[in-house]
Image (tube, rainbow, N blue to C red):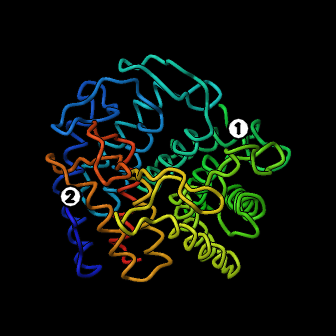
Amino acid sequence: MTGASFRSLSDAADWYRDWLAQAALPLWAAAGVDAESGAFHEALTLSGQPTPAPRRARVQARQVFVYTQAAQAGFGPAWLAVAERGYGVYRDRYRRKDGLFAILTDEAGQVLDDAPHLYEQAFTLLAAAALQAAGPETPRYALDAHALAEALEARRHAAGGFRELGEHPYQANALMHLLEAVMAWEALTADARWTRLADELVALARAKFIDPQGGFLREFFDAEWRPAAGDDGRWVEPGHQFEWAWLLARWAERRGDGAALATARTLYARGLQGVDRTRGVAVNILWDDLTVRDAGARLWPQTEYLKAALRLGEEAEVLHAAAALANYLDVPLRGAWRDKMRPDGAFVEEPAPASSFYHIMLAVLELLAGR
């Protein structure tokens, strides 16, 4: 660990702006892109080599989002071409006839798993919203989003929300990212579909996902949105307390809903209970009594810690979170990162996953906005 520290928000913003502009964006647009197809690689070694692996839909959609946001935020119009090319490849390879998107292809673009997981659909909607915002005269992205949203109606659940595929069909995480994407579309259009869905997802989270006594958010549920049986029902992630707090705060500001903002503040406070002050990081998982279940610390909870602190915390907490995240970015290849910290504070030596860039980008943009 570097022991990175920042004197002020301006100091932190300058450091991250330079890291993003001079290192991360150029690296992942060059080494992180398949030059022949324009698709995005799954990961880079810490010497900058792509690692062979099947390509997940979430990585393609997230990288499209990252490079669209970079162009929109003033880091250079050239980044939009990276995003547009990447989306074109993604759409061609992953889009199903029903408007939903498969979750996995091989490196040549052949579909390995065409299951349309809700999580991946949410990120597809988010990427399309970013592209639509960058080029409002192009209806293609809105058409894709509406077709996807229509197809998802078949996945509605009688007790509210939507079912996910896989071993946890009733989960908060996929619906959180769906809320994020829906709010992005709501900001672009007067179509009431997006507003209604955002309100529905927020109501479900407040009524079912958040423990009424403890004020923390659980991860897994049964078909009635009650906590899942066994240990799964006791699963509490600090990173998701922060991420939901950030989203609920934004929703509350749009609606002028003071009660929802108070809920966001409580979630933020519960997330802080998962910050290990010795290492300075948010840990992976707590039990529902808020004791530590998994003391490892991945990169992404640190970005959510920073985003939530910027919205809901004090400046000292923001600077603490910014320093925590910077430690993960201290690697020999500037612009890459480490993903996993062990409980003893050492990092796992492995390739940098491209999927982390979405989390980092949102945290940096929030920091640059001064929130």
- Cβ atoms under marks 2 and 1 closer than 8 Å: no
Residue at which label 1 appears = 169
At x 53% / y 57%, what residue is drawn? 292
At x 65% / y 79%, what residue is drawn? 262
> Quick check: 221 left or right of 325?
right
> Quick check: 182 left or right of 207?
left
Circle nearer the N terminus (2, 1): 2
Q: Position of residue 119 (x, y in %)?
A: 58, 41
Residue at which label 2 appears = 21
* Above or below for 260 versus 94: below
- How many other residues sit within 10 Å of disc 2, few (<14), some (14-19) or many (≥20)? some
> Based on the displayed image, in which of its 4 quarters is residue 328 positioned?
bottom left
Q: Is residue 192 visible?
A: no
* Above or below for 42 versus 219: above
Number of marks in the image? 2
At x 47% / y 79%, what residue is drawn? 313
- Give the distance between the C-alpha atoms of the residues marked 2 and 1, in whole angstroms: 39 Å
- The image quadrant where one finds the N terminus is bottom left
Judged by depth in the image, the label closer to the viewer, 2 or 1, is 1
Q: Position of residue 39 (x, y in %)?
A: 34, 31
Q: Position of residue 337 (x, y in %)?
A: 26, 48
- Specify the label residue 256 is tagged with: none
> Based on the displayed image, in which of its 4 quarters is residue 350 positioned?
top left
Name which residue type carries label 1: Pro
Residue in front for this viewpoint, 285 or 245? 285
At x 69% / y 36%, what residue is drawn? 151
